[in-house]
């Protein structure tokens, strides 16, 4: 796995480019709060079967250098736009998990070349259903990795036997977070504070086709909150995955991948059909 680290305008980025032989279009894959390029390899590899896929850790996410929360999500979106220009990406389909939702929405406001936006487990700010949980996670992040790991999983998961591999996924998530260096937890802290004070820009003016995917039992981004977000989007489509919570991408990876690629595949099909018309 080749991961490239680079600095642009004194900002630190990590990214991975996966080429697709049959496409000149791009998917830009943005990650959740505790995700990194390595942890989403199965998704990015699958996406690259359809289009060139660029998985990006924007400044202040993943393994990049921490950004103080005085730097806004709008600023992060601007950094992403400048990086796409640097990569000479003229247009892209945006796929984002969780935290990346806010950045993706801001990118749509400042970059008119978003072909589609597909989101899993996110809304463009912290929903009212998640504000208290976010404050608890921030407090736990200042305590110890163990406290933070427990707070994170308690806030984002539910105890429901209908969720596949629920207990095993929770245990694995706790182990993974406990093993994280303090720098990764500090990144989460700053991004959470950033989200708490964030006000999304012009959601109702996003004209690109959008898919919003959420787990049925997600206690953080509830299906009601996701429904409201999807309804704000002029061309929004809601997908609720049954018997899942916020870790839906681990519980139903194939279903999530299908949902994230639906807009991409629809546009590919349209282009192919139009190309056959004389």
Image (tube, rainbow, N blue to C red):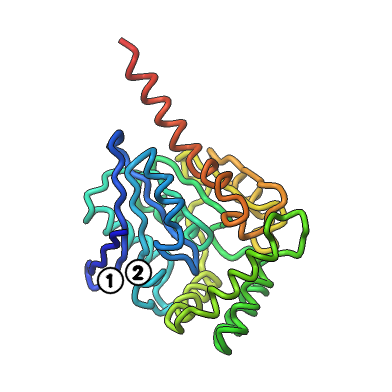
Q: Residue at x 26, y 63 (%)?
A: 4
Please provide percent x and percent y for residue 149: 60, 78
- Cβ–Cβ under 8 Å for marks 2 and 1: yes
Which of the two residues, 78 or 13, is positioned nearer the viewer here?
13
In the rendered view, does 228 fall on the left or right side of 80?
right
Residue 205 at least partly seen:
yes
Q: CA distance from mark 2 to mark 1?
A: 6 Å
Please provide percent x and percent y for residue 273: 39, 19
In the rendered view, does 161 fall on the left or right side of 30?
right
Q: Quadrant of the N terminus?
A: bottom left
Q: Secondary structure at mark 2?
A: loop
Disc marking residue 141? none
Q: Residue at x 40, y 30 (%)?
A: 268
Please provide percent x and percent y for residue 196: 55, 72
Q: Quadrant of residue 154?
A: bottom right
Q: Secondary structure at mark 1?
A: strand
Q: Quadrant of residue 40?
A: bottom left
Residue 223 at least partly seen:
no
Up-down relation of residue 166 to residue 112 (above or below) = below
Up-down relation of residue 139 to residue 165 (above or below) = below
Please provide percent x and percent y for residue 222: 68, 57
Up-down relation of residue 117 to residue 270 (above or below) = below
Up-down relation of residue 187 to residue 119 (above or below) = below
| Crowd rating for badge 2 (residues with CA inside 10 Å; few <14, some 14–19, many 20+) | many
Name the residue carrying label 1.
Answer: 11
Which of the two residues, 30 or 3, is positioned nearer the viewer here?
3
Q: Which residue extends farthest top?
A: 278
Name the residue carrying label 2.
Answer: 59
């Amino acid at each position: 796995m080749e991961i490239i680290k680079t600095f642009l305008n004194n900002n630190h980025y990590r990214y991975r480019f996966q080429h697709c032989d049959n496409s000149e279009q791009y998917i830009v894959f943005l990650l959740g709060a505790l995700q990194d390029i390595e942890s989403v390899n199965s998704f990015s590899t699958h996406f690259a079967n359809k289009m060139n896929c660029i998985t990006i850790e924007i400044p202040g996410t993943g393994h990049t250098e921490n950004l103080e929360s005085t730097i806004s999500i709008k600023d992060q979106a601007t950094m992403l736009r400048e990086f796409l220009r640097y990569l000479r990406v003229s247009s892209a389909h945006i796929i984002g998990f969780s935290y990346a939702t806010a950045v993706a929405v801001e990118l749509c406001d400042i970059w008119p070349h978003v072909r589609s936006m597909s989101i899993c487990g996110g809304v463009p700010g912290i929903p009212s259903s998640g504000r208290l949980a976010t404050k608890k996670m921030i407090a736990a992040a200042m305590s110890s990795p163990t406290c933070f790991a427990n707070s994170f999983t308690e806030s984002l998961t539910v105890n429901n036997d209908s969720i596949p591999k629920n207990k095993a996924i929770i245990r694995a998530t706790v182990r993974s977070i406990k093993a994280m260096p303090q720098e990764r937890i500090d990144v989460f802290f700053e991004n959470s504070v950033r989200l708490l004070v964030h006000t999304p820009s012009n959601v109702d003016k996003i004209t690109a086709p959008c898919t919003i995917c959420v787990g049925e039992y997600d206690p953080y981004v509830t299906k009601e909150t996701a429904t409201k977000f999807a309804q704000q989007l002029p061309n929004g489509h809601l997908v609720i995955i049954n018997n899942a919570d916020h870790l839906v991408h681990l519980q139903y990876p194939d279903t999530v991948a299908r949902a994230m690629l639906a807009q991409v595949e629809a546009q590919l099909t349209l282009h192919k059909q139009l190309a056959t018309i004389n």
